[in-house]
Amino acid sequence: MFPLPSVPRRTWTAVGALLLLAALTALVALPRTDRDASARQDGAPTEITDDGGIPWPGEGQAAVTLEGSGQVLTHGAQRPVPIASLTKVMTAYVVLTGHPLRPGEEGPRIEVDPQAAHEAGVGGESTVVVTPGDRRTERELLHLLPSANNIARLLARWDAGSEEAFVRKMQRAAHDLGMRDTTYTDASGIEPTTTSTAADQLKLAREAMRLPALRDIVATRETTVPGVGRVANGNTLLGTSGVVGLKTGSSTPAGGNLLWAAKTDGRHLLLGAVLHQRANTTPAEGLTAALEASRTLIDGLRARPRTQGSGG
């Protein structure tokens, strides 16, 4: 599809980046209906690899897109890597597509089973203490989900009968979204065999941010769940640099990961994924690196359209 095969790769990718940035600038001025129609006509998003000109992370991999543009800009080898708790975006997506919540709706009450209570504090993973027999609303559990692996597995069992059956639903959803380089083996992301790429995670982010309940939950900095207490969002970028979501994830094999959504103006979303930062160190070091790299990337991209537009 490229008409200039003789152009060196580095030169072409730089041109591709400039073309994408110009397209993003133009798309900001288009009504949503025009942009969405254009994306549908183009089919699957076009991936353009960039080698410079944008403040990408110095390691790992990343991808960005403007919602509705039909183009994805990637950096680093898009090979499957462990994604830790980014997995829970798909967990929430599958739960909410099967059990939708209207704005403000709490949803059905779900009984906490003995397994979810037993798993709290066991195995050194992120969990919350819950009491067997307690009944929590779907929305309450989804607010706990980002920081609680035992809640991810509880929701999986509630939705599909077992975590194994739920994981099969996750994998089918990934297939339907065109996430060809993604493998889900658990509902929480604790298993390093759950892997994906930055470009694939953007395919999920686009659909996830179209669910009002999920969009509201990932934008909440903190909330209070009765019987559990204050629940803080680990995404410390929320409320800065236009960030309105989505999800952090960190572990020793995964390093630090962030799937993010940021407003470019009042109504457009810039979506991005930064994966595999400081892998094989500590989860805290990896997450700090992912947050810092994402902030730099977001600020650089949000500034670019304004700079180009003012010069025209």
Image (cartoon, grey):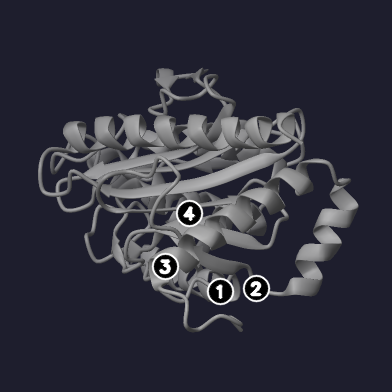
Q: Report how far apart the C-alphas of labels 1 and 3 lie in the structure.
A: 17 Å
Q: Report how far apart the C-alphas of labels 2 and 3 lie in the structure.
A: 25 Å
Give the foreground label among 2 and 3: 2
Q: Residue at x 21, y 38 (%)?
A: 286
Return the x and y of residue 157 as percentages of the image width and height. Answer: 43, 58
Q: Report how far apart the C-alphas of labels 2 and 1 lie in the structure.
A: 8 Å
Nearest the viewer among 119 and 45 is 45
Point out the tag, 2 or 4, that comes first from the N-terminus. 2
Q: Please say if 296 is above or below 149.
A: above
Left or right: 67 with respect to 179? right
Give the foreground label among 2 and 1: 2
Task: Check contact, mark 2 vs mark 4: CB within 8 A.
Answer: no
The residue under label 4 is which amino acid type? Thr
Q: Residue at x 72, y 39 (%)?
A: 268
The residue under label 3 is which amino acid type? Val
Look at the image and tell me whether residue 238 can be seen.
Answer: yes
Nearest the viewer among 131 and 72 is 72
Return the x and y of residue 24 as percentages of the image width and height. Answer: 68, 48
Return the x and y of residue 49 as percentages of the image width and height. Answer: 45, 64
Task: Check contact, mark 2 vs mark 1: CB within 8 A.
Answer: yes
Q: Report how far apart the C-alphas of labels 2 and 4 lie in the structure.
A: 23 Å
Look at the image and tell me whether residue 131 can be seen.
Answer: no
Residue at numbered disc 4: 91
Residue at numbered disc 1: 178
Return the x and y of residue 17 as percentages of the image width and height. Answer: 54, 56
At label 3, counting other C-alpha atoms closer than 10 Å, the crowd grade (few under 14, some 14-19, many 20 or more) is: many
Residue at numbered disc 2: 44
Image quarter for residue 118?
top left
The residue under label 1 is which amino acid type? Gly
Point out the tag, 2 or 3, that comes first from the N-terminus. 2
